Image: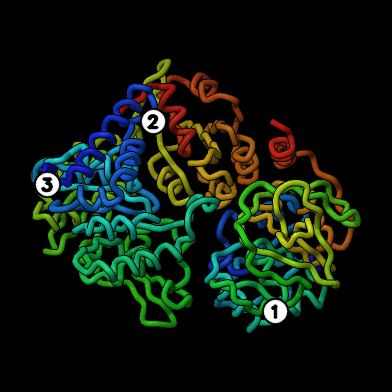
Amino acid sequence: MSSDRIKIVWIYPDLLSTYGDQGNTIVLERRAALRDIPTETVHLRSDEPVPDDGDIYLLGGGEDRPQILAAQRLRADGGLTAAVQRNAVIFAVCAGYQIIGHEFGGEEGQPLPGLGILDIRSGRGAQRAVGEVVGDVAAELNVPRITGFENHQGATTIGPNARPLAKVVSGVGNGDGQGFEGAYAGHTLGTYMHGPALVRNPALADLLLTWAVGMELPPLQPSWSERLREERLNAVLTPR
Amino acid sequence: MSDLPLRSQLAVALGKTAARMSRLAGKGDGSVIGGRIGLRLDPELLTRLAKDRKLVLVSATNGKTTTTRLITSAMTPLGEIATNAFGANMPTGHVSALASAPDARYGVLECDEKYVPMVLKETGANVVALMNLSRDQMDRAAEIWLLAGKWRRALEASPESHVVANCDDPLVTWGAATARSVTWVAAGQHWREDSWCCPECGGPLDRQGTEEDSDWRCRQCHFARPKPDWVLRGDHVLGPDGRAVPLSDVQLPGRANRSNAAIALAVVAQFGVPPEQALPLLAQVRSVAGRYTTVEHQGRALRLLLSKNPAGWLEAFDVLAPAPGPVALSINAQGPDGRDTSWLWDVDYRILRGRPVWATGERRVDLAARLEAADVQFTVVDDIEQAVLAVPPGQLDVIANYTAFQDIRTRYGRVV
């Protein structure tokens, strides 16, 4: 944390905010506030420069064209690469997840260059993955089973310099046949759990906050988010 | 109708029989099954049924059913109108609507956004009304930029069709801009989260003026708001002749319905129905397929509002009784609702602070997590009845998404 507050930068809501992505900023602000940690959130439009003093950068989902535009503008800006170098936290969802990798598939599936700040490569998968996804998170992150909703046609392969965020229990996830969902390296984390992924996974939100402040945070009273997480896990994993 | 080839006549007859049986079995109004059987027997049935009629197609993310109803009402001076009044807005529904009104010279058809190109091609509709595009049920619906691109190609290939389009919505404007003739209506846009970027080049869109009267243009390319022929201003519409037409008699509440009424006036003007003749007919519409209906139950007056997506919630909030009027919210995530509830996070629920709020529906826990994060005080109930009995006698506004709305409507008395 660079100052007395956590600075959250929501990258390009004008391009990458397809479905409830705002929820991630709201949850981070709220879980910080409940611990008396002030936050400042910047809704960064795509015609503005990426601030160099952010603590947490969020990237959301988007349609094909906005995704391509966002990648072009972020590559030209260079601010996110610098943010990774100073160990800021990056949380990227869906189209944003693909953008932070080395390459992703364009409107016709053609390979397009990403930011290359996470060692993943994405292309177009055979079919669209739409539905609930559940995964068991890499042990070193100490985050319980995650739940989300995926809606993508990507196939993402993780390179040697990144690790899988989770092993898929139900759903598709990265969709490259390896059975993983999401990827991370250092303080950069990406996932296909689209939209407000942190709402259903408060422990994942707390992991990002912990990275941002650089120390363990006190636990919070359970909220409706925990109830929601349990309900969704039960809905997916209970045989009917 | 008698002009139809024998096979088509048979297709229509069998479709009607199936529809009647479906109705008798209590499975809705039967228009989908009837149309499906008709189209299977004669794949060109829609084209044949549309022949020699003057047709209007109505499409948008929100307001299709209501605007279809308003236009139909305002066109009654022209004679019988064929219409799919119950929201069966795909080709099967269009076939049923046209087949059940064989002598109608006019038709007003609500059309699902994705089906506009196909239905336009098959019917050669005379007028196409296009109102708004915003994020909606993305687990099954098309991406809206893609959708607008398909409208462009379809309209380019249909030069005889006249378009009436809302030029306050940049994506709709872009989708309509390839039509040979367009009436532009400044019908307003309140949900703007899907139109920060130029649909033509991706550059930033700059807006000027007030929310009520807002001009927009791209900072990077030539794309800009066309000069409107009709302008919605508060509760008046300014027509092409510059006269102000008051909308105060329109019974359907809120700015979204004033917007729908403005589009309806511009559409019926294409058929020679002037605003002064159309207005009293618009005023006859009081509820549309249960929407805006008030039902009485145990001394409470429940007003039912349907909201299916973030833009729709914004419009529902606009018509709520003033705070501290109580509100019940009900959310499901069945197929027709979209199985993904992420969109709840695009709705700004803070406006409900200071009211008694009840959360229910199959996805009430999703709703609770959202309301909690917005610092809204609320009570979660398993059943809408608990909310109804908990409020004092008087009005209760109920906002629900699609299947939740149908559940409540069925329970407290279907008003069709």
Mark 2 belongs to chain: B
Can you identify the residue that label 2 sits on?
B303
The spot of residue B349 in percent (x, y) is 54, 45
User: Do the residues at pointers 3 and 2 share their chain?
Assistant: yes
Badge 1 amino acid:
Gly
Binning the other alpha carbons within 10 Å of mark 1 as few (below 14), some (14 to 19) or many (20 upward) gives: some
Instruction: Give the CA separation, mark 3 to mark 2.
Output: 46 Å
Q: Does residue A100 appear anywhere in the picture?
A: yes
Same chain letter for marks 2 and 1: no
The answer to whether any part of residue A22 appears in the image is no
Q: Nearer the viewer, residue A193 or A131?
A: A131
Q: Residue at x 65, y 81 (%)?
A: A75
Direction from residue B105 to residue A232 in the image, left or right: right
Q: Tell me, yes or no, whether the two marked residues, 3 and 1, touch with CB atoms within 8 Å.
A: no
To which chain does the residue with label 1 belong? A
Q: Residue at x 30, y 50 (%)?
A: B43
Local crowd size for mark 3, using a 10 Å CA cut-off: few (<14), some (14–19), many (≥20):
few
Task: Residue under label 1, please give it.
Answer: A79
- Residue at x-position 27% and y-position 44%: B95
Q: Which mark is residue B3?
A: 3
Q: Amino acid at mark 3?
A: Asp
Q: Nearer the viewer, residue B285 or A218?
A: B285
Dots 2, 1 in contact, CB < 8 A: no
Cα–Cα span, label 2 and label 1: 50 Å
